[in-house]
Amino acid sequence: MKAMPMVGRAIAHGAVTVINAISCGFGAALGVDLWTEAEVRLTDEPGRIVGRILSDPDESPILMEKVVNRVLRYFNLEGEYGAYVETRSNIPIARGLKSSSVASNAIALATISALGKTGEVDDLTIVNLGVDGSIDAGVTITGAFDDASASYFGGLVITDNMKRRILRRLEVEEHAVLIYVPGEKAYTAKSDVESMRLIAREAKAVHELALRGEYWSAMTLNGILYSSVLGYDPTIAIDALRAGAVAAGLSGKGPAVASVVPTDRVEEVLNAWEGYGGEIIKARVNHEKARIVS
Protein backbone atom coordinates (compact mmCIF):
# COMPACT_ATOMS: atom_id res chain seq x y z
CA MET A 1 0.00 0.00 0.00
CA LYS A 2 1.34 3.43 -0.96
CA ALA A 3 2.20 5.97 1.73
CA MET A 4 0.07 9.08 1.98
CA PRO A 5 1.18 11.91 -0.33
CA MET A 6 4.09 13.89 1.06
CA VAL A 7 4.71 17.63 0.99
CA GLY A 8 7.99 19.54 0.67
CA ARG A 9 8.65 23.27 0.80
CA ALA A 10 11.82 25.15 -0.05
CA ILE A 11 13.07 28.67 -0.70
CA ALA A 12 15.82 29.86 -3.05
CA HIS A 13 17.11 33.40 -3.44
CA GLY A 14 17.57 35.61 -6.45
CA ALA A 15 20.58 36.59 -8.54
CA VAL A 16 21.71 39.23 -11.03
CA THR A 17 24.22 38.99 -13.83
CA VAL A 18 27.87 39.78 -13.43
CA ILE A 19 28.86 38.11 -16.73
CA ASN A 20 26.28 36.77 -19.17
CA ALA A 21 27.39 33.28 -20.32
CA ILE A 22 25.32 33.17 -23.50
CA SER A 23 28.06 34.50 -25.78
CA CYS A 24 31.06 32.42 -24.64
CA GLY A 25 29.84 29.80 -22.17
CA PHE A 26 31.62 31.37 -19.17
CA GLY A 27 29.55 33.33 -16.69
CA ALA A 28 29.27 34.91 -13.26
CA ALA A 29 26.33 35.95 -11.12
CA LEU A 30 25.67 37.61 -7.78
CA GLY A 31 23.16 36.35 -5.22
CA VAL A 32 20.55 38.88 -4.04
CA ASP A 33 17.92 38.58 -1.32
CA LEU A 34 14.89 38.32 -3.58
CA TRP A 35 13.21 34.91 -3.28
CA THR A 36 11.01 32.18 -4.69
CA GLU A 37 9.26 29.65 -2.46
CA ALA A 38 8.01 26.32 -3.81
CA GLU A 39 5.63 23.75 -2.36
CA VAL A 40 5.51 20.28 -3.90
CA ARG A 41 2.74 17.89 -2.89
CA LEU A 42 3.29 14.35 -4.18
CA THR A 43 0.23 12.49 -5.46
CA ASP A 44 -0.56 8.90 -6.38
CA GLU A 45 -1.13 9.84 -10.03
CA PRO A 46 2.16 8.98 -11.80
CA GLY A 47 2.87 11.06 -14.89
CA ARG A 48 0.52 13.89 -13.88
CA ILE A 49 2.27 17.01 -12.65
CA VAL A 50 0.14 20.14 -12.21
CA GLY A 51 1.71 23.50 -11.43
CA ARG A 52 0.59 27.02 -10.60
CA ILE A 53 2.65 30.20 -10.24
CA LEU A 54 0.68 32.04 -7.56
CA SER A 55 2.51 35.34 -8.07
CA ASP A 56 2.04 35.30 -11.89
CA PRO A 57 -0.79 32.85 -12.75
CA ASP A 58 -0.74 33.59 -16.50
CA GLU A 59 2.80 32.22 -16.88
CA SER A 60 3.34 28.67 -18.15
CA PRO A 61 3.93 25.97 -15.51
CA ILE A 62 6.14 23.88 -17.81
CA LEU A 63 9.29 24.54 -15.75
CA MET A 64 7.61 23.08 -12.67
CA GLU A 65 6.64 19.93 -14.56
CA LYS A 66 10.10 19.40 -16.03
CA VAL A 67 12.04 19.97 -12.79
CA VAL A 68 9.80 17.63 -10.77
CA ASN A 69 10.13 15.04 -13.56
CA ARG A 70 13.91 15.31 -13.43
CA VAL A 71 13.97 14.73 -9.67
CA LEU A 72 11.52 11.79 -9.81
CA ARG A 73 13.55 10.23 -12.63
CA TYR A 74 16.80 10.67 -10.66
CA PHE A 75 15.35 8.50 -7.89
CA ASN A 76 13.59 6.12 -10.35
CA LEU A 77 10.22 7.18 -8.92
CA GLU A 78 8.48 8.65 -11.98
CA GLY A 79 6.25 5.55 -12.06
CA GLU A 80 5.27 6.02 -8.41
CA TYR A 81 4.25 9.66 -8.03
CA GLY A 82 2.72 12.66 -9.67
CA ALA A 83 2.77 16.10 -8.06
CA TYR A 84 0.93 19.34 -7.47
CA VAL A 85 3.34 22.30 -7.39
CA GLU A 86 2.86 25.90 -6.33
CA THR A 87 5.38 28.73 -6.30
CA ARG A 88 5.23 32.30 -5.10
CA SER A 89 7.92 34.89 -5.63
CA ASN A 90 8.85 38.56 -5.50
CA ILE A 91 11.01 38.24 -8.64
CA PRO A 92 9.49 39.64 -11.86
CA ILE A 93 9.41 37.01 -14.62
CA ALA A 94 11.22 37.44 -17.98
CA ARG A 95 13.16 40.59 -17.06
CA GLY A 96 16.68 39.10 -16.83
CA LEU A 97 16.40 38.53 -13.07
CA LYS A 98 16.93 34.73 -13.02
CA SER A 99 13.35 33.88 -12.12
CA SER A 100 13.61 30.49 -13.86
CA SER A 101 16.89 29.49 -12.20
CA VAL A 102 15.61 30.49 -8.77
CA ALA A 103 12.33 28.62 -9.27
CA SER A 104 14.13 25.50 -10.51
CA ASN A 105 16.31 25.44 -7.37
CA ALA A 106 13.32 25.87 -5.06
CA ILE A 107 11.23 23.25 -6.90
CA ALA A 108 14.05 20.69 -7.04
CA LEU A 109 14.81 21.12 -3.33
CA ALA A 110 11.11 20.97 -2.37
CA THR A 111 10.61 17.79 -4.42
CA ILE A 112 13.60 16.13 -2.77
CA SER A 113 12.21 17.16 0.61
CA ALA A 114 8.76 15.74 -0.24
CA LEU A 115 10.40 12.44 -1.18
CA GLY A 116 12.32 12.36 2.11
CA LYS A 117 15.61 12.14 0.19
CA THR A 118 17.44 15.22 1.48
CA GLY A 119 20.35 13.24 2.91
CA GLU A 120 20.93 11.39 -0.36
CA VAL A 121 21.96 14.22 -2.70
CA ASP A 122 24.60 16.93 -2.52
CA ASP A 123 24.06 20.59 -3.32
CA LEU A 124 25.57 20.51 -6.82
CA THR A 125 23.39 17.55 -7.79
CA ILE A 126 20.32 19.57 -6.76
CA VAL A 127 21.51 22.56 -8.80
CA ASN A 128 22.13 20.33 -11.83
CA LEU A 129 18.69 18.71 -11.58
CA GLY A 130 17.19 22.20 -11.72
CA VAL A 131 19.44 23.18 -14.64
CA ASP A 132 18.44 20.02 -16.54
CA GLY A 133 14.77 20.78 -15.87
CA SER A 134 15.24 24.33 -17.15
CA ILE A 135 16.80 23.01 -20.38
CA ASP A 136 13.96 20.48 -20.76
CA ALA A 137 11.46 23.33 -20.34
CA GLY A 138 13.20 25.50 -22.96
CA VAL A 139 13.48 28.48 -20.60
CA THR A 140 17.27 28.78 -20.88
CA ILE A 141 19.88 28.78 -23.63
CA THR A 142 23.03 27.71 -21.75
CA GLY A 143 21.39 25.99 -18.78
CA ALA A 144 22.22 29.10 -16.73
CA PHE A 145 24.52 27.18 -14.38
CA ASP A 146 26.02 30.49 -13.18
CA ASP A 147 22.63 31.94 -12.26
CA ALA A 148 21.49 28.71 -10.61
CA SER A 149 24.70 28.47 -8.58
CA ALA A 150 24.54 32.08 -7.35
CA SER A 151 20.88 31.58 -6.46
CA TYR A 152 21.54 28.32 -4.59
CA PHE A 153 24.77 29.17 -2.77
CA GLY A 154 24.60 32.97 -2.50
CA GLY A 155 27.56 35.31 -2.88
CA LEU A 156 29.35 35.85 -6.17
CA VAL A 157 29.91 32.74 -8.27
CA ILE A 158 32.16 32.54 -11.35
CA THR A 159 31.55 29.52 -13.56
CA ASP A 160 32.32 27.47 -16.64
CA ASN A 161 28.75 26.84 -17.79
CA MET A 162 29.72 24.35 -20.48
CA LYS A 163 31.41 22.03 -17.98
CA ARG A 164 29.08 23.08 -15.13
CA ARG A 165 32.02 23.92 -12.92
CA ILE A 166 32.19 26.60 -10.24
CA LEU A 167 35.59 28.25 -10.76
CA ARG A 168 35.39 30.66 -7.82
CA ARG A 169 32.92 31.45 -5.04
CA LEU A 170 33.37 34.77 -3.29
CA GLU A 171 31.77 36.46 -0.31
CA VAL A 172 31.59 40.06 -1.45
CA GLU A 173 30.80 43.35 0.25
CA GLU A 174 27.35 43.70 1.87
CA HIS A 175 26.18 46.31 -0.64
CA ALA A 176 22.66 47.22 -1.65
CA VAL A 177 21.52 46.02 -5.08
CA LEU A 178 19.11 48.34 -6.88
CA ILE A 179 17.37 46.93 -9.93
CA TYR A 180 15.58 49.00 -12.56
CA VAL A 181 12.76 46.94 -14.11
CA PRO A 182 10.97 48.25 -17.22
CA GLY A 183 7.43 47.10 -17.93
CA GLU A 184 8.11 44.86 -20.92
CA LYS A 185 9.11 41.19 -20.70
CA ALA A 186 11.95 39.55 -22.66
CA TYR A 187 12.01 35.75 -22.64
CA THR A 188 15.46 34.12 -22.75
CA ALA A 189 14.34 31.48 -25.25
CA LYS A 190 13.54 34.28 -27.74
CA SER A 191 16.85 36.09 -27.31
CA ASP A 192 19.07 37.15 -30.21
CA VAL A 193 21.79 34.55 -29.61
CA GLU A 194 23.54 35.24 -32.91
CA SER A 195 24.18 38.87 -31.95
CA MET A 196 25.36 37.90 -28.48
CA ARG A 197 27.90 35.46 -29.89
CA LEU A 198 29.53 38.29 -31.85
CA ILE A 199 31.09 39.44 -28.54
CA ALA A 200 32.30 36.00 -27.37
CA ARG A 201 35.98 37.02 -27.29
CA GLU A 202 35.28 40.22 -25.40
CA ALA A 203 32.99 38.43 -22.91
CA LYS A 204 35.71 35.86 -22.24
CA ALA A 205 38.18 38.68 -21.51
CA VAL A 206 35.68 40.20 -19.07
CA HIS A 207 35.28 36.78 -17.42
CA GLU A 208 39.07 36.59 -16.90
CA LEU A 209 38.94 40.04 -15.34
CA ALA A 210 36.38 38.75 -12.82
CA LEU A 211 38.54 35.71 -12.03
CA ARG A 212 41.37 38.12 -11.18
CA GLY A 213 39.13 39.79 -8.58
CA GLU A 214 37.97 42.78 -10.64
CA TYR A 215 34.37 41.58 -10.56
CA TRP A 216 32.66 44.97 -10.23
CA SER A 217 34.51 46.29 -13.30
CA ALA A 218 33.60 43.06 -15.08
CA MET A 219 29.91 43.54 -14.27
CA THR A 220 29.88 47.06 -15.71
CA LEU A 221 31.81 46.07 -18.85
CA ASN A 222 29.53 43.06 -19.40
CA GLY A 223 26.51 45.38 -19.21
CA ILE A 224 27.97 47.75 -21.80
CA LEU A 225 28.86 44.89 -24.17
CA TYR A 226 25.46 43.21 -24.03
CA SER A 227 23.54 46.49 -24.16
CA SER A 228 25.39 47.37 -27.36
CA VAL A 229 24.55 44.11 -29.19
CA LEU A 230 20.99 43.82 -27.88
CA GLY A 231 20.07 47.44 -28.54
CA TYR A 232 19.54 48.64 -24.97
CA ASP A 233 20.41 52.16 -23.86
CA PRO A 234 23.29 51.96 -21.31
CA THR A 235 22.48 55.43 -19.92
CA ILE A 236 20.55 53.98 -16.95
CA ALA A 237 23.64 52.05 -15.83
CA ILE A 238 25.93 55.02 -16.43
CA ASP A 239 23.64 57.26 -14.37
CA ALA A 240 23.90 54.76 -11.50
CA LEU A 241 27.71 54.78 -11.73
CA ARG A 242 27.75 58.57 -11.78
CA ALA A 243 25.61 58.56 -8.61
CA GLY A 244 27.99 56.26 -6.72
CA ALA A 245 27.29 52.64 -7.73
CA VAL A 246 30.40 50.41 -7.75
CA ALA A 247 28.97 48.42 -10.68
CA ALA A 248 25.95 48.63 -12.96
CA GLY A 249 24.78 46.87 -16.08
CA LEU A 250 22.20 44.85 -17.95
CA SER A 251 21.11 41.74 -16.05
CA GLY A 252 20.91 38.66 -18.25
CA LYS A 253 19.49 39.49 -21.65
CA GLY A 254 17.60 42.41 -20.10
CA PRO A 255 15.65 44.51 -19.95
CA ALA A 256 16.39 44.92 -16.21
CA VAL A 257 19.50 46.83 -15.12
CA ALA A 258 21.18 45.95 -11.82
CA SER A 259 23.43 48.25 -9.84
CA VAL A 260 25.59 47.40 -6.82
CA VAL A 261 25.52 50.37 -4.48
CA PRO A 262 27.23 51.18 -1.16
CA THR A 263 24.58 51.80 1.49
CA ASP A 264 25.46 55.48 1.82
CA ARG A 265 24.85 56.10 -1.92
CA VAL A 266 21.47 54.41 -2.29
CA GLU A 267 19.46 57.65 -2.22
CA GLU A 268 21.68 59.22 -4.87
CA VAL A 269 21.13 56.29 -7.26
CA LEU A 270 17.39 56.28 -6.60
CA ASN A 271 17.29 60.00 -7.40
CA ALA A 272 19.29 59.44 -10.60
CA TRP A 273 16.76 56.83 -11.75
CA GLU A 274 13.69 58.83 -10.74
CA GLY A 275 12.76 59.99 -14.21
CA TYR A 276 12.90 56.62 -15.99
CA GLY A 277 9.49 55.20 -15.09
CA GLY A 278 9.27 51.44 -14.62
CA GLU A 279 9.86 49.86 -11.21
CA ILE A 280 12.88 50.00 -8.92
CA ILE A 281 13.48 46.95 -6.72
CA LYS A 282 15.58 47.43 -3.60
CA ALA A 283 17.56 44.33 -2.61
CA ARG A 284 20.84 43.40 -0.94
CA VAL A 285 23.66 41.00 -1.67
CA ASN A 286 22.65 37.55 -0.39
CA HIS A 287 25.02 34.95 1.10
CA GLU A 288 22.35 32.53 2.32
CA LYS A 289 21.97 29.10 0.72
CA ALA A 290 18.71 27.72 -0.64
CA ARG A 291 16.97 25.75 2.10
CA ILE A 292 14.05 23.54 3.00
CA VAL A 293 11.25 25.35 4.82
CA SER A 294 9.39 23.49 7.56
Image (cartoon, rainbow, N blue to C red):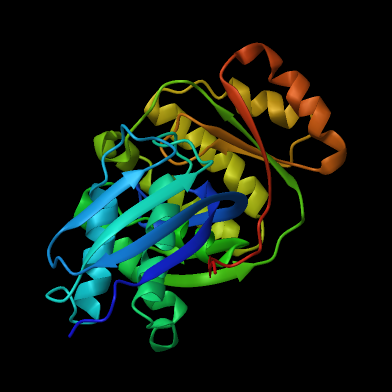
Query: Is 254 rendered above or below residue 138?
Result: above
Q: Quadrant of residue 238?
A: top right
Quarter of the picture holding the C terminus: bottom right
* Residue at figure coordinates x 52%, y 42% from the top left: 222
Residue 282 placement (x, y as % from top left): 68, 37
**Left or right of residue 198: residue 180:** right
Query: Is 23 rendered above or below residue 150?
Result: above
**Left or right of residue 136: residue 98:** right
* Residue at the extreme right of the image, as rendered: 264
**Left or right of residue 216: residue 195:** left
Q: Quadrant of residue 264?
A: top right
Front position in the image: 39 or 15: 39
Residue 26 placement (x, y as % from top left): 41, 58
Quarter of the picture holding the N terminus: bottom left
* Residue at figure coordinates x 34%, y 39% from the top left: 196
Front position in the image: 139 or 36: 36
**Residue 163 seen in render:** no
Tally of numbered tags: 0
Residue 223 placement (x, y as % from top left): 53, 37
Residue 131 placement (x, y as % from top left): 33, 62
Front position in the image: 179 or 86: 86
**Residue 191 seen in render:** yes
Front position in the image: 148 or 292: 292
